[in-house]
Image (spheres, helix red, strand yellow):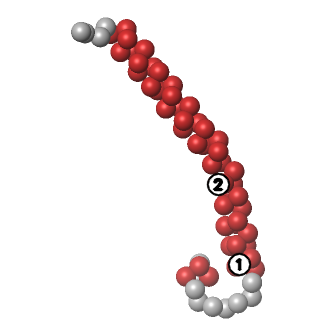
Amino acid sequence: MEVSMFWKIVLAVVLVWVALAVVGALIKGLFWVLVVGAVGFGIYFLVKAMSGSDDNSPASRF
């Protein structure tokens, strides 16, 4: 039984649609995790830069 080209195209469109829906949901769900992580790292490096310690850790050399 041969599948016609029409059904192959329909199947491909449905698969791409489902994949984009899953990826979109993941990006939407993880966006705020990324934002909170970026703010946390920013605050950490700001506090580290403003602290008066003279240690020679790799982050303080630059």
* Of residues 48 and 32, the one drawn nearer to the viewer in this rendering: 32
Type of the residue with mark 1: Ala
Q: Is mark 2 on a helix, strand or loop?
A: helix
Find disc 1 in the rendering and name its residue: 49
Residue 34, label in figure: 2
Q: In this view, does 43 lie above or below 10?
A: below
The kind of residue on which mark 2 rests is Leu
Q: Position of residue 22 (x, y in %)?
A: 54, 35
Left or right of residue 45, residue 4 in this image: left
Comparing 45 with 12, the one in front is: 12
SS at mark 1 in the image:
helix
Q: Which of marks 1 and 2 is nearer the N terminus?
A: 2
Q: Nearer the viewer, mark 1 or mark 2?
A: 2
Cβ atoms at labels 1 and 2 below 8 Å apart? no
User: Would you place residue 21 above or below residue 28 in this image?
Assistant: above
Write down the quadrant of residue 10 in the picture: top left
- Which residue does the image show at 59% across and 79% down from the upper left? 59
Q: Is residue 59 above or below residue 15?
A: below
Instruction: Locate residue 56, reporting x and y percent.
Output: 59, 89
Q: How many marks?
A: 2
Foreground residue among 28 and 60: 28
Q: How packed is label 2: few (under 14 Cα within 10 Å), some, or many (20 or more)? A: few
Question: Image point 46% across, 26% down: which residue?
Answer: 16
Horizontal side, residue 22 vs residue 46: left or right: left
